[in-house]
Image (tube, rainbow, N blue to C red):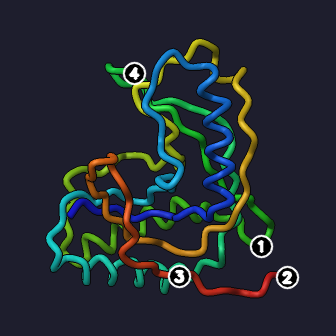
Amino acid sequence: MRIFYAAEFPEAVKQAMADNIAEVKKHTVRGSFTWRDNFHLTFVFVGECAPNDIEKLKQAADSVVAKLNPPPIDVVIDGLGTFPRPDGAILWAGMKTQKVQSEPRNILSEINSALLAELRAVGINLKQEYSRFVPHVTIGRRVELNKPLELIKFKPVNFAIDAITIMESIGSNKGIIYEPLYRAEFIKKLRA
């Protein structure tokens, strides 16, 4: 099983992202773009796991939610960036919290760090840990643009993250699909 922790997107957000990709595609020479149903924010990529590891993975997610006690997190997806690769760039849209005075912390990075610590605590060893967490949504791979990033229109997308989801990446005859296995839901708090 190929596993990662993610924030799932509601249907309206998936559609808004698909609309943004349609605009981005007008300015590309080539690329393989993310399917509408596969949009997500990856908190931690775990990699190959045995089915009997699922309980440990659930325990880690539940522990992070209990320790951090986050309310639903208001975020905005906005601004394009790339991760250079020899075969073409990974094109992504950045994600950041819509900080309010009552929630000044960088909660997305805190979730990433807490998940890494909890995975180690329950005996899940990651094949690779990245030195820096960059909250983003992958838009496409092997992308070659014919226009500078800053000139491509991208409409900001707002929504609230309300859970950490354990996802399985499954190969199919249609390509890779992501299947949610478990949701550790945030505690709903009344907002002032």
Q: CA distance from mark 2 to mark 1?
A: 9 Å
Going from the N terminus, do you reach mark 3 or mark 2 first? 3
Q: Could you say whether the residue bearing mark 1 is in a helix, strand or loop?
A: loop
Q: Which residue is mark 1?
A: 102
Of circles 4 and 1, the one toward us is 4
Figure check: 8 above or below 190: above
- The residue positioned 53% from the left and 37% from the top of the image is 92
Of circles 4 and 2, the one toward us is 4
Q: In the image, what residue type sits under mark 1?
A: Ser
Q: Can you give x and y, in whole percent of width and height, for residue 139 in the image?
A: 52, 39
In this rendering, position of residue 177 left or right of residue 159 = left
Q: In the image, what residue type sits under mark 2?
A: Ala
Q: Name the quadrant containing residue 26.
A: top right
In this rendering, position of residue 185 left or right of residue 117 = right
Q: Which residue is mark 2?
A: 192
Q: Which of the labelled discs sits on residue 88, or is there none?
A: 4
Q: In the image, what residue type sits under mark 4?
A: Gly
Q: CA distance from mark 3 to mark 2?
A: 21 Å
Q: Could you say whether the residue bearing mark 2 is in a helix, strand or loop?
A: loop
- The residue positioned 70% from the left and 65% from the top of the image is 74
* Mark 2 and mark 1 residues within 8 Å of each other at the beta carbon: yes
Q: Residue furthest top?
A: 146
Going from the N terminus, do you reach mark 3 or mark 1 first? 1
Of circles 3 and 1, the one toward us is 3
Q: Can you give x and y, in whole percent of width and height, for residue 161 in the image?
A: 61, 68
Q: CA distance from mark 4 to mark 3?
A: 36 Å
Q: CA distance from mark 3 to mark 1?
A: 21 Å
In this rendering, position of residue 153 left or right of residue 132 = right
- The residue positioned 61% from the left and 54% from the top of the image is 14
Q: In the image, what residue type sits under mark 3?
A: Glu
Q: Can you give x and y, in whole percent of width and height, for residue 168 in the image?
A: 31, 64
* Mark 3 and mark 1 residues within 8 Å of each other at the beta carbon: no
